[in-house]
Image (spheres, rainbow, N blue to C red):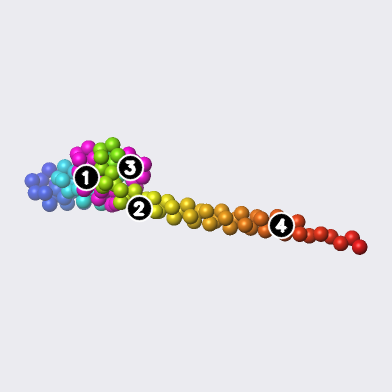
Amino acid sequence: LENHELIEMRRISTLVYKKNKRYKQSIDLSKQDKMYKDAMETAFESGNPELAESLLRFFVENDMKECFAACLFTCYDLIRPDVGMELAWRKGMMDYAMPYLIQVMREYTGRVDVLDKKTQKKEEAQEKEKSASNDFVPDYM
């Protein structure tokens, strides 16, 4: 099927590869047929950050800015922010990566706020323990 002349038949072969968890072959065939949306969905479904980042690099090397931006969001959970930022910076695609970077910043800020609140509660509890133990003054009369 992968060498068939009709693109839909080759697309079926990419779906068969994907179902059999042969993600790299599915992505390669999708890239060959310029079915980039299928390649992004396969990369996401694989759960493999290396596959997602290699697909992202493919888009950068071929100067496909819109596909780069779409891949950042489709594979959001798999792509490390430093990789996305570096690739965008090196190829002058920061405008396309900025929405992704803003979302990552927002998510990380939320995580830090939650951790800060937990730490603050623990510190307050420890302070109460220390002050409670010091409040006891025995009467010896």
Mark 3 residue element: helix
Q: In percent of the image, x 61 and y 54: which residue is there?
A: 123
What amino acid type is highlighted by mark number 1? Lys
Magenta-tinted stretch: 58-86
Tell which circle, 1 or 3, labels the residue nearer the N-terminal end. Answer: 1
Q: In percent of the image, x 30 and y 48: which residue is there?
A: 98
Hey, which quadrant is residue 86 in on the image? top left
Residue 42 appears at what percent x and percent y? 26, 49
CA distance for labels 1 and 3: 13 Å
Q: Which residue is mark 3?
A: 85
CA distance for labels 3 and 4: 48 Å
Please report contact status of discs 1 and 3: CB closer than 8 Å, yes or no.
Answer: no
Mark 2 residue element: helix
Tell which circle, 4 or 2, labels the residue nearer the N-terminal end. Answer: 2
CA distance for labels 3 and 2: 13 Å
Query: Mark 3, residues whose alpha carbon is within 10 Å: few (<14), some, or many (≥20)?
Result: some
Q: Which residue is mark 2?
A: 103
CA distance for labels 4 and 2: 42 Å
Tell which circle, 3 or 2, labels the residue nearer the N-terminal end. Answer: 3
Q: In percent of the image, x 36 and y 41: which residue is there?
A: 82
Please report contact status of discs 3 and 4: CB closer than 8 Å, yes or no.
Answer: no
What amino acid type is highlighted by mark number 4? Ser
Tell which circle, 1 or 4, labels the residue nearer the N-terminal end. Answer: 1
Q: In percent of the image, x 28 and y 44: which residue is there?
A: 94
Decide whether residue 69 is among the magenta residues: yes
Mark carried by residue 84: none
Q: Which residue is mark 4?
A: 131
